[in-house]
């Protein structure tokens, strides 16, 4: 069965610093992986996804993630943090083909950006 | 752009009431999902539906039911609301395919007094 682990429930960075949010997955098949962002009192918004092909995936708002099969990781990065990046971030893996099209979500990482 | 609309952003109800949360998507998606989100517990799947009139239990279905009479609409029903159902409720939809993302509504913050 697929699973997702996000290391660090809270990450704090200074404005302008590198953002690194960690995600490790477990999957018996080549995975489909997703990163979502949630701003306060809003739903989840898709940042980026990995399905097949290029292992470095670029998303919205300057974020990118690299799929590393050997490390079973899909870490999210952004070269320079902005105050507007403060939010909660969720990594997810598709449960397909084990069952239907559900997503398995990590527990989330709250990103704090210090001025 | 996919639009998932939840009928209320904030809702206050009383213990024992029957509560309906409505969700509508405009992109002809086959799959629809209801989650609840609580601090420290992440997103937990309540029910999902992969076709009209079809439904499957998620991880925490107790105390809830769902209805999907039309493809675009998925309703979550709290049969007899209790205080422990105070939470943020999120609806999502997706196309068929393991590589398809889920698209979320803005959520309903439900308080049961």
Image: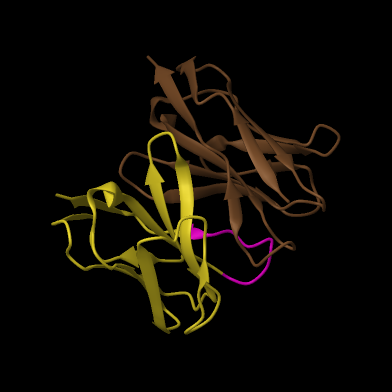
Q: Which residues are magenta?
A: B95-103
A81 left or right, relative to B8:
right
A26 left or right, relative to A42:
right
User: Which residue is at the front of the view, A96 or B72?
Assistant: A96
For the colour yellow, the matching chain is B
The answer to whether residue A77 is seen in the rendering is no
Query: If the image is split into quadrants, where does the C terminus of chain A sit?
Result: top left
User: Which residue is at the front of the view, B101 or B70?
Assistant: B70
Q: Is residue B33 above or below residue B66?
A: above
Question: x, y (%) of residue A46?
Answer: 52, 50
Q: Main secondary structure of the magenta part?
A: loop
* Total numbered badges shown on the rendered structure: 0
Residue A34: say if magenta. Answer: no
Q: Is residue B55 above or below residue B33?
A: below
Colour in which chain A is drawn: brown
Query: What scheme was used to colour the molecule?
Result: by chain
Classify residue A77 by image quadrant. top right
- Residue furthest to the right in view is A70
Question: x, y (%) of residue A3?
Answer: 67, 44
The answer to whether residue A84 is seen in the rendering is yes
Q: Is residue A93 above or below residue B48?
A: above
Question: x, y (%) of residue B28?
Answer: 49, 79
User: Which residue is at the front of the view, B16 or A63?
Assistant: B16
């Amino acid at each position: 069965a697929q699973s997702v682990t996000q290391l660090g429930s809270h990450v704090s960075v200074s404005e302008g610093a590198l953002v690194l949010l960690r995600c490790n997955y477990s999957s018996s098949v080549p995975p489909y992986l997703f990163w979502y962002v949630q701003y306060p009192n809003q739903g989840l918004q898709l940042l980026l996804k990995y399905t097949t092909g290029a292992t470095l995936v670029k998303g919205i708002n300057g974020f990118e993630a690299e799929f590393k099969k050997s490390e079973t990781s899909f870490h999210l990065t952004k070269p320079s943090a902005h105050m507007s990046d403060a939010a909660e971030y969720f990594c997810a893996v598709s449960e397909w083909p084990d069952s239907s099209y559900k997503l398995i979500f990590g527990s989330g990482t709250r990103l704090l950006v210090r001025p | 752009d996919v639009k998932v609309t939840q009928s209320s952003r904030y809702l206050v109800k009383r213990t024992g009431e029957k509560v309906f949360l409505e969700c509508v998507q405009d992109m002809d998606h086959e799959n629809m999902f209801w989650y609840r989100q609580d601090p420290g517990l992440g997103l937990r799947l309540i029910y999902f539906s992969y076709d009209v009139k079809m439904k499957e239990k998620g991880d925490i279905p107790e105390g809830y039911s769902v209805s999907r009479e039309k493809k675009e609409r998925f309703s979550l029903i709290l049969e007899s609301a209790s205080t422990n159902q105070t939470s943020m409720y999120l609806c999502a939809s997706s196309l068929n395919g393991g590589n398809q993302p889920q698209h979320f509504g803005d959520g309903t913050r439900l308080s049961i007094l």
